[in-house]
Amino acid sequence: MGMPAELSDASANLKRRSFLKWGMTGIVANALNKGLANMPEPKPENRKTRPNIVYLFSDEHRWCSCPFTERPDLPTPNMSKLAGQGLRMDNCCSTSPICVPYRGMMITGQWPHQSSCISNEVFLDPGVIGKKSPTIAHAFNDAGYTTGYIGKWHLHNDSVYHAGFDEFTHWLYGDNHWETEVRDVPSKEEFRKVEGYNAIGMTDQALDFLDRHAKDEDPFMLMISLNPPHWRWDDAPKEMLDMIPEGEELYYRPNVNKEPFEKREQEVFYYRNYLAHICAVDREVGRVLTELEKQGLEDDTVFIYSSDHGSSFWSNDATSKANPFDESVRVPFIARWPGRIEAGRICNRNIGTMDLFPTLCGLAGIPVPEECGGTNLAPTLLSQPQKVPETQFLTVNSFRRNYFKRRLGEDPGNSFVPCRGVRSERFSYIVNADGPWLLYDNLADPYQMHNLIEDPAHEATREKLHTELVGWLAKAEDPFLPEELKPSDVAERVRCQNEYYCLKLHEKDWAAYRASLSAILEKEDVSPEQRKALPRVVTEVSDADNFGFWLACDQEINGKRKWTSFSKEEIRKRQEDHQADTLKEAAVRLSDIT
């Protein structure tokens, strides 16, 4: 089992190599690490008995925007070439299609409620990364691999120091692709601003890693986390944007609501930039593949391209990610290992985020840590017989925008929708806070335009998939949750968890709200017995349901961003009436105390 980094600093330091630095200090550092006389000790011929691993993943690249699916018009020759040289897993799903949960699962091998990487808003225990549990880096380090991570991290910033990677360049999460904060983690340097398209800079560092470790006796495992095509969608490289069609030549999926694109030219511009960013990612994929060939590493290296999640662009009226539709959930997964992974093969078996950690271990022939909750699908990738789960678990967790809209009575829409579901090779079945929500036959209805959730002809399918979902919940959630957060009714589970995590982020506001109620009630003519009971009564009347509505109003009035179409004046009046009703209820309860 991998030892957390804080307990093995000495061991880790022995393995650290130099890391590419930009500027004169970096040149000096590299020179020192390579030997002052520039005469490194001769290394033996490559005697690796296990493959190198290069896992390159982008951010927000959906499966349907690939050259080998629906977009042969996209100038992405390297992805097309890679698909021909390797294996496509065309039912690869992002288990929780948003940045933080994906990275939490990939790095720890744990379910979101197990690792506490629950949503972009909720990451409760950064100590799970490398302190309380080993990471994928520890697993590979223990097996004699040199490990590297380059690019976007998007987990707690301090967790980089115990993530276990021998070499780690942390590119800070941000929306500007042309100006990014970057730091070298092993040297504990401060962030420095780097200008230039960040995917190029990340790839430059990846090429340096490959150059320095090409002739090592030990194999390496390198993870490259490219920022594009994640938002912003107004800053794609011009040379890429110029290649994207305009007007009637621009392709939209049949399930797209075209009205926003027709009313707002900006939506079209965003969509074209998104596609242009994908082309820019393709360029970087090509650079890494070329370097592997140049260094003579391609036959000894498992190269995988994938993405953390997709994006909807108004398909099924969803604007972005964190929803259960295929545009958000389904992502590319291409694996190449010449001579071992069959070239040009397309596999429709399910693979999800939780399977990445154990599958990479399986391909490398190293033990899968017991903390991993997914399946080692290496046999499937290698065309070997394997029994795999019939479905993949899908989960979208806490989002305040959804909770606040619901509490104020406005339809939250189809983006950032807390839900649970499963996806098989054929069907998608989803439950949200209102109950069973979606059932799609993805083979007969690949654009998910015909919801079969109330179709009597599919009742048996619905019941079977619901049973599958309950089974996944028993594995992925129940062992890690208190009883009050895992009711047997799935819709109620979704609702109460969303409320719990949203309110947990505002515990100080909750305490202040109760204090304000107490201060008002204390001014009333109350007996000593009533005054003694006041804290209990205030706690009772300001429960989660009561505070949740007050908070939703407060966020609309005072928050950085409004989520509903209601005016602030209307919301303020509703909040005042709500507080008055709460005080009346408290007064009634106090009056019963004599």
Image: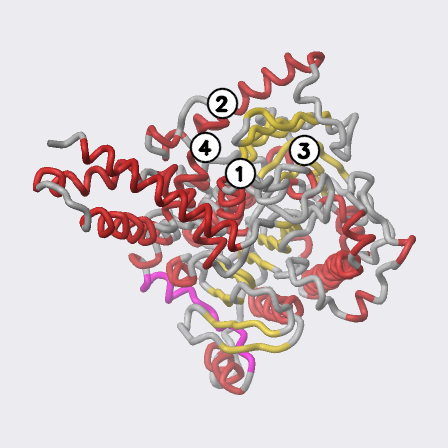
- The residues colored magenta run 9-22
Which residue is under mark 2? Answer: 470
In this view, the mark in front (4 or 3): 4
Cα distance in 3D space between marks 1 and 4: 16 Å
Label 2 residue SS: helix
Label 4 residue SS: helix
Residue 244 seen in render: yes
Q: Earlier in the sequence, mark 2 or mark 4?
A: 2
Which residue is under mark 1? Answer: 418
Which residue is under mark 3? Answer: 383
Q: Earlier in the sequence, mark 4 or mark 3?
A: 3
Q: Amino acid at mark 3?
A: Ser
x then y, percent, for residue 451: 71, 26
Label 3 residue SS: loop
Q: Residue at x 67, y 71 (%)?
A: 197
Cα distance in 3D space between marks 3 and 2: 30 Å
Q: Quadrant of the C terminus?
A: top left
Label 1 residue SS: loop
Q: Earlier in the sequence, mark 1 or mark 3?
A: 3
10 Å neighbourhood of mark 2: few (<14), some, or many (≥20)? Answer: some
Tell me whether circle 4 and circle 3 mark residues in contact (CB < 8 Å). Answer: no
Q: Amino acid at mark 4?
A: Ala
Q: Amino acid at mark 1?
A: Pro
Image height of 256 relative to 380, above or below: below
10 Å neighbourhood of mark 4: few (<14), some, or many (≥20)? Answer: many
10 Å neighbourhood of mark 1: few (<14), some, or many (≥20)? Answer: many
Cα distance in 3D space between marks 2 and 4: 10 Å
x then y, percent, for residue 52: 58, 54
Quadrant of the rendered structure where residue 546 is? top left
Quadrant of the rendered structure where residue 11 is? bottom left
Cα distance in 3D space between marks 2 and 1: 16 Å
Q: Residue at x 43, y 43 (%)?
A: 549
